[in-house]
Amino acid sequence: MPHLLDTVRSTLIVIVVALFIIGFLAQPFRIPSESMERTLLVGDFLLVDKVAFAPPGIWNWLLPYRNIARHDIVVFHFPLDSEEHVVKRVIGVPRDEVTLEKGVAVVNNTPQAEPYDVFERADSDEYRDQFPRYTTDDPAVDPHWREQMHGLVENAHLRVPTQSYFVLGDNRNHSRDSRYWGFVPRQNIEGTPLVIYFSVREPSATDTLPLPSDRLGNSVGDRWVDFARWDRILRTVH
């Protein structure tokens, strides 16, 4: 019985610590789509820092709280479905004026240096690439956002309201983001990706078929090696 009680006590401690970490400090997520390629790949498992953007309160002297800035990657509750988590990159912060020119973000009349951007092959789309200059009947655009957007556009620039953020995917031609459903409210933002702790090799919708290989290999070892992207494990995200 003493050994059983010790085991139960240890298990409860582990559960409490895990719940505390997930609830207040960090949380694991898995990337399901190609919208953040090549920064984040389908099959990446992230550990998200929930402290960085939290209200500092009395712990400001101890923990590294900071404001959300342009180019930060954020994980947030999707505005159209609060149960769903989404990851994108912040392009516009409150009071910024945002527009896109051929897919490149221009903020406050300054083209942004975006070395993380990927422009994979896609059909021409003026709404997507010249946002918000062109209106669209694309069913992917949320109708409430379409109405709200028209009231915030002036001289082809979209003004970001207070306590709101304009976000885009790094895979600019293959991302459903603020262009299609609107701003992310500050209270929806959970944190920022800290590290890729594991990565499973999974296909992306934008992958091109590789050339056939002459290499022979059907062993368990070959399948184990090909199972994961080992070079991405413990890679920091930025």
Image (tube, rainbow, N blue to C red):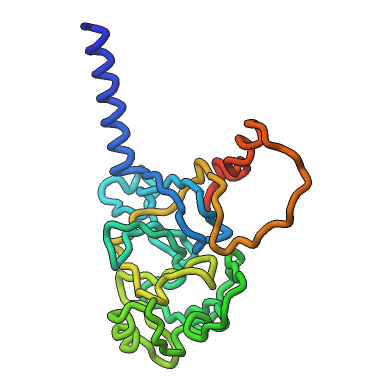
Write the residue at 28% across / 63% down.
81
Q: Position of residue 147 (x, y in %)?
A: 29, 86
Write the residue at 34% across / 45% down.
61
Specify the farthest residue to the right. 214
Q: Is residue 188 above or below residue 234?
A: below
Q: Is residue 98 above or below residue 93?
A: below
The image shows a total of numbered marks equal to 0
Q: Is residue 221 above or below residue 117?
A: above
Q: Is residue 45 left or right of residue 214?
A: left
* Residue 186 seen: yes
Q: Position of residue 165 (x, y in %)?
A: 37, 70
Choose top left, top right, bottom left or bottom right for residue 7.
top left
Q: Is residue 234 left or right of residue 186?
A: right
Q: Position of residue 5 (x, y in %)?
A: 22, 13
* 193 or 69, nearer to the observer: 193
Q: Is residue 66 above or below residue 174?
A: above
Write the residue at 33% across / 71% down.
164
Q: Is residue 162 left or right of residue 137?
A: left
Choose top left, top right, bottom left or bottom right for residue 189.
bottom left
Write the residue at 58% across / 67% down.
117
* 224 or 60, nearer to the observer: 224
Quadrant holding the N terminus: top left
Q: Is residue 12 left or right of residue 222?
A: left
* Residue 238 seen: no
